[in-house]
Amino acid sequence: MKKIFSSLCVVAVMFACVPMVFGQTIKIGFNIPLTGEIPKVGEESKYAGEMLLNEINGNGGLEVGGEKYMLEFVYEDNESKAESAVTAALKLIERDKVLAIVGPNSSKQAVPAGQVCNDNRTPMISPWSTNPDTTKDRPWVFRAAFLDPFQGPVATDFAIKTFNAKKAAVLYALANDYSKNLAEIFQADFNKKMGEGAVVAFETYGDKDQDFSAQLTKILAAKPDFIFLPNNYNEVALIVKQAHDLGWNGPFMGADAWGNSELMTLCGDDCKGHYFSTHYAAAGATGATKEFIDKYTKLYGYQPADVAALTWDAINVVLAGIQNAGKVTGNLRKDRKNLKNGISAITEVKGITGNMKFDEQGDPIKCAVVVKISDTGEFEFTESVCP
């Protein structure tokens, strides 16, 4: 939108006050965890954002309706907390007056922040949240990730086929919307396909827990064929190590929150050979996905995880929505509404995590991939599963 600084006075010989007009700018906010439990998620979102920002501005800006607009990104730390995500959303909407918000990533923060954005009629897109409640009955909220009702059965079917699993165990974070919802979806789906009671252990833990030995002892006593862990990468590293210390030698199946560049730093050899469902596989990527990975790795010194790729795609959805709207009026309320309608009208976006079409809830219809953690610690493509 046009940012006009009209009150800057220049003292000249005639003591005239001359209005100075600077470039046209579109301001987009980021509600991301730069501190707290999962700061690497916020870092990767920010890095992906900066990379795209520099690319677009370096080419003269974003073209909308025949005019060029420079982009400005405003990063707000939600500290990996639900209440901070709400505060961050309000700051970006009211203080910074952004056109749209990218994030939060984790469902624990995205669900409450999504309510704030919807209530304040500000478009929001979560790159990484898979909980249906993030977008449910919220026409102003979108996402770039598939949903847990799709991801849960992916884990079920893969485990039955690959591990010949007839019994499963689950350990999840009770206070985490993402972890709890996905655990419950998996439990219902596995019991439906393998018979009631096929999930032989269904254990929980609380915030800040570091010792999981009591829950794991119960799980091992139930003799499952594999353990499903729909948990954040930092918790996965602790759980897997402790399970091995207690004598577990069976397989683990994880979900997309495993897919962080820091997982192998924290988990090491303990995580090698295990599987998780996610949004893209970095190892063996081709085309635009490989170009993104190579450029990111060169700039920042490590391979981007799925959240970085999804952030890239989420920003491009916003930009496509702006271009779809056809113009930027300078009236923030009107431009936010035009953007919401512009995103809703998108027929397809070709993303580096896959092509996306959006349904009436603002959710993308896209494929998932299952990756295996190789002996060298890479996330290798195993199979693709599409709706």
Image (tube, rainbow, N blue to C red):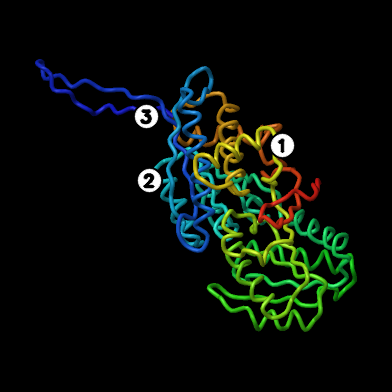
Residue 14 percent coordinates (x, y): 10, 15
Q: From the viewer's perspective, tell me whether residue 299 is left or right of residue 106.
A: left
**Lower position in the chain sequence, tag 2 or tag 3:** 3
Residue 237 lies in what quarter of the image? Answer: bottom right
Residue 44 percent coordinates (x, y): 53, 48
Rounded to the nearest angstrom, the CA distance separating label 2 from label 3 is 15 Å
> Mark 1 belongs to which amino acid?
Asn
> Between residues 14 and 279, which one lies in front from this camera angle?
279
Q: Secondary structure at mark 3?
A: loop
Q: Say which residue appears at 18% left-offset and 22% top-offset.
A: 17
Q: Which mark is residue 155?
A: none
Residue 127 percent coordinates (x, y): 60, 47
Circle 1 Cα neighbour tier, 10 Å, few/some/many (<14 / 14–19 / ≥20): some
Quickly name the residue at label 2: 95
Quickly name the residue at label 1: 355
> Mark 3 belongs to which amino acid?
Lys
Q: Say which residue appears at 88% left-offset and 60% top-offset.
A: 161
Quickly name the residue at label 3: 3
Rounded to the nearest angstrom, the CA distance separating label 1 from label 2 is 34 Å
Residue 376 percent coordinates (x, y): 67, 55
Q: Secondary structure at mark 1?
A: strand
